[in-house]
Image: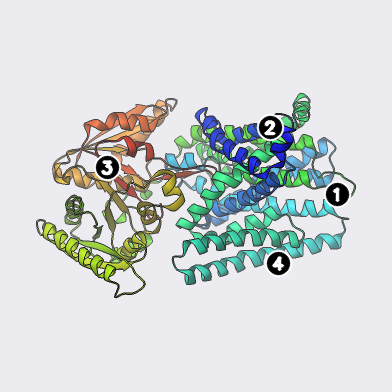
Amino acid sequence: MASEFLTDSPIIAFTILLTVIFTVPPIFERLRLPGLVGLLLAGVILGQNGLKLLDSDSETVKLLSDIGKVYLMFVAGLEIDLDQFRKTKNRSIGFGFLTFIFPMLAGILVGRFFNFGWNSSVLIGSLLASHTLLAYPIVSRLGVVMNEAVTVTIGATIFTDTGALLVLAICVGIHSGEFTTLSLLTLLGGLIIYSIAVLFGFDWLGKEFFRRSGDEQSNQFLFILLALFLASVGAQVIGVEKIVGAFLAGLAVNDVLGRSPVKEKIEFIGSVLFIPCFFVDMGLLINIPAFLKTLSSFWLTLLIIVALIGSKFLAAFFTKLLYRYNTAELLTMWSLSLPQVAATLAATLVAYQTVNSAGERLISEGVLNSVIVLMLVTAILGPITTARFATTLQVSQAELDTDSLSMWWGNTEEKLLEENHYPFTVLVPIYNPQTQRYLIEMAALLAQHESGRIVTLAIAKSHVHMDDPQLGIALEQSQQRLKLAKDISQEFDVEVQTAIRIDDDVALGISRTSREQNASLVVMGWSKTTGLRARLFGSVIDSVFWSSHCPVAVTRLLNSPSTIRRILLPVGDLMPQTIGALRFAQILAYHNQGEIVLLHVCDPNTPTPMVEQFTGQLSEIINNSKLQVNTEIQTIRNDDVAKVIIREAPGFDLAVLRAVRYRTTGGLAVSQVTTQVIKELTCSIVLLGAPHS
């Protein structure tokens, strides 16, 4: 009776789900296992084969799981980097076709070998054809995202996921009704028209709405959610599974959102609530006796896993031959395309729940269980092998040659500014009179080196009526802060201009002024808004990082920049952003006759030749720099990067860090790498962020 009461109460079921989502994934991640594995296991334990606290048939679980399923595919479409795809479009389509067709054929052969019908066999093939970029954070951390083989693999995702979902739509359509050539042509025709309508219609509507709505993030958020569910409902209306519509909606609004704060909020809501509910529901569906029976006669499971791993390797191998990639690039492409999570699991659940008029499922329970095992194996194997092979990749030296401060991130607009001879401009937003001296001193030092200028900015909060007395007081206070800033600036031999802006949003006011002033860099003070509150509501720093067109340096300076002698710079990769951080540190050290320690923390299992290769490339970059500064490279083997940085930092005056976010596709985890370090460091800090970071 108690268990029935628990499963029948929506509030209690929702509370249990929240408790699981809050507690289980962190425990599994500490054990170095994917958090989604913990969610699946929790579903098994809490389901009908365990404690009977949750029921997959309850309306609460059904609703949250359905939302999570479409949200998962929506975010999968949203996370595909269209810019990366455009850079290597032809090669991405080439690898996408190979890594789709080989697993497709392998899956069909497995299905036919076990006497499944042609429709079910083709569906099994489509389940293997897609891939999830679960190891993307690893190649991002290693700084090899710009390697062509990695870019091609990222771009291929759009082809494999779209193809797999289209095959799913056709197979479900055939299984649900009587199959005729006319019905198939009707389904395909409707699917093509619907896809065009969603991809182009939502893209146009989104751009128009965002243009007209300005900075109303709440309305933009609701518009994107509405687009998601309209596309899902529309797919069902034409007889196609709703996850197809969700994925197409993600692709459609991809360009609209770009890397805006709205996208961050959409992914955050999905990753912390709806998507985990979907994985818990997958666990609820696992029938333990049937699962053990599947594993006891494990040939189906084994052949599916072997077919996936072997076919993905063949696809990468033929791509290597076709485009003349080296062995390291072959193995990285293979390992990146291994994980089967987002599209595979969503499509598997749809296929399992598709029942025809005769009561037959599209795929059997054995296939469902085998795919879950496949997901667990590839979700662990893919990232491990990527971490092993991607360390041997190289990025061309041309990508690393950034010697001008204004060219840190190789931004096209910044190149245009340089060609038009705009002066190097440092924008300094000021608010706190106690810290603005150090900010201006830092900005002056950088501007002097680049023969540029400083623009000090004060922002007054907007009011409905421009004659509001409160606005008048705010403007007067801003004038006083700017006067003090100008007095401080007179001490430095650099051109200084002042600006006042009336704006509703402080962060956007900073970003807009930096754009109007053609700023090359924003130097701003520290904000204490971090953690969950910043994730939910955002902070000024987060918003400026997202919206700025140029690099941003957020500073927590305990002493005058002129007293900085020893600078610590953690170096994990050779991305242009890292080279920019090195350039920043070199300018400070050069003016203060200081020294820099480049701290490279690598995995204990990294082969010595790879470590030597990395430090050799780093030494070459240092030697080729126009600024000759006393620089030491220190390598420490440890799997806890934050702990090493915190341990080494006390002997330094300043730590220069990069603001980098690492995500898994599907939005399953969002974290800021520097958070722990920032909380515990006691020295001065400069946090460097690239545009849209």
Specify the amino acid type for callout 3: Ile
Q: Which residue is found at the position 86% from the left and 60% from the top?
A: 181
Q: Which callout, 2 or 4, points at the residue further toward the start of the chain?
A: 2
Identify which residue, 448 or 527, lies in the foreground.
527
Q: Which residue in the protein does label 2 denote?
A: 44
Q: Position of residue 135 (x, y in %)?
A: 53, 40
Q: Nearer the viewer, mark 1 or mark 2?
A: 2
Q: Is residue 312 above or below residue 512?
A: above
Measured in 3D between alpha carbons, the distance from the residue under mark 3 to the one under mark 4, in whole angstroms, is 54 Å
Colour basis:
rainbow
Q: Which residue in the protein does label 1 denote?
A: 356
Q: Which callout, 1 or 2, points at the residue further toward the start of the chain?
A: 2
Specify the amino acid type for callout 4: Ile
Q: Position of residue 275 (x, y in %)?
A: 60, 45
> Residue 23 bears which disc, if any?
none
Measured in 3D between alpha carbons, the distance from the residue under mark 1 to the one under mark 2, in whole angstroms, is 27 Å
Q: Which residue is found at the position 67% from the left and 30% from the top?
A: 45
Q: Is residue 196 above or below residue 63?
A: below
Measured in 3D between alpha carbons, the distance from the residue under mark 1 to the one under mark 3, in whole angstroms, is 62 Å
Measured in 3D between alpha carbons, the distance from the residue under mark 2 to the one under mark 4, in whole angstroms, is 41 Å
> Residue 193 bears which disc, if any?
4
Q: Which residue is found at the position 62% from the left and 53% from the top?
A: 159
For label 1, the SS is loop
Specify the amino acid type for callout 1: Asn
Q: Which callout, 4 or 1, points at the residue further toward the start of the chain?
A: 4
For label 2, the SS is helix
Q: Nearer the viewer, mark 4 or mark 1?
A: 1
Q: Is residue 102 left or right of residue 474?
A: right
> Residue 685 bears which disc, if any?
3
Q: Which callout, 1 or 3, points at the residue further toward the start of the chain?
A: 1
